Image (tube, rainbow, N blue to C red):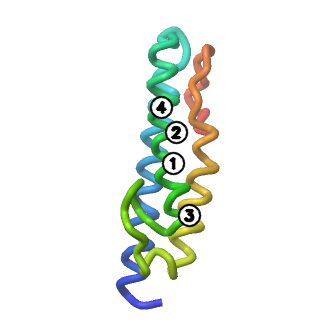
Amino acid sequence: MTSSELLITGLHLAVSIAGFALCRWLSIALSGPRASTRWYWLSVITTITWGMVQLNTARNGSLLFLAPENQLFMSNEPVRWVAFVGSLLQALCTPDSEKPKRWYWF
């Protein structure tokens, strides 16, 4: 793996973790007494949008919705695996009517 592929893989991992953390924080913040239909749909739309970006990267090798396929992403399997696992983790980002415990992250 060349240094540019390593850099792209590391940056994509960092962005994926940040996106998951944002979606998870949003779902925890909107759970409990603040749970309402409007906030629920805001959280779901944010999570689905980020999950679509991740799945598009995992499946097609393109970073954005309509971006052309980049050969660097097509040939970089770790980036595609990170995107696939990140899209699966998005299932944990759904708000609940009960407030989660403080230690509860997953």
Q: Whole-Å distance between the Cαs marked 1 and 4?
A: 10 Å
Q: Is residue 106 above or below residue 10?
A: above
Whether label 4 touches label 2, CB < 8 Å:
yes
* Mark closest to the chain's N terminus, 1 or 3: 1
The span from disc 2 to disc 1 (Cα, nearest Å) is 6 Å
Identify residue for label 4.
45
State the residue position of label 1: 52
User: Which residue appears at 42% of the width and 80% of the height?
Assistant: 72
101 to 18, vertically: above or below: above
Disc 4 secondary structure class: helix
In space, the residues marked 4 and 2 are separated at their CA atoms by 5 Å
> How many other residues sit within 10 Å of disc 2, few (<14), some (14-19) or many (≥20)?
some
Q: Residue at x 48, y 21 (%)?
A: 30
Per the image, the residue denoted by label 2 is 48
Looking at the rendering, which quadrant does residue 93 occupy?
top right
Name the amino acid, label 2. Ile
Residue type for callout 4? Ile
* Circle 1 crowding by C-alpha within 10 Å: few under 14, some 14–19, many from 20: some
- Label 4 – label 3 distance at C-alpha: 20 Å
Image height check: is 30 above or below 46?
Answer: above
- Secondary structure beneath label 3: helix
Q: Residues within 10 Å of mark 4 (few under 14, many from 20)?
A: few
Quarter-wise, where is residue 94 in the image? top right
For the residue carrying disc 3, how many other residues have a C-alpha within 10 Å: few (<14), some (14-19), or many (20+)?
A: many
For the residues labelled 2 and 3, say whether their Cβ atoms are less than 8 Å apart.
no
Q: Secondary structure at mark 2?
A: helix
Residue 32 locus on image (x, y percent): 55, 14
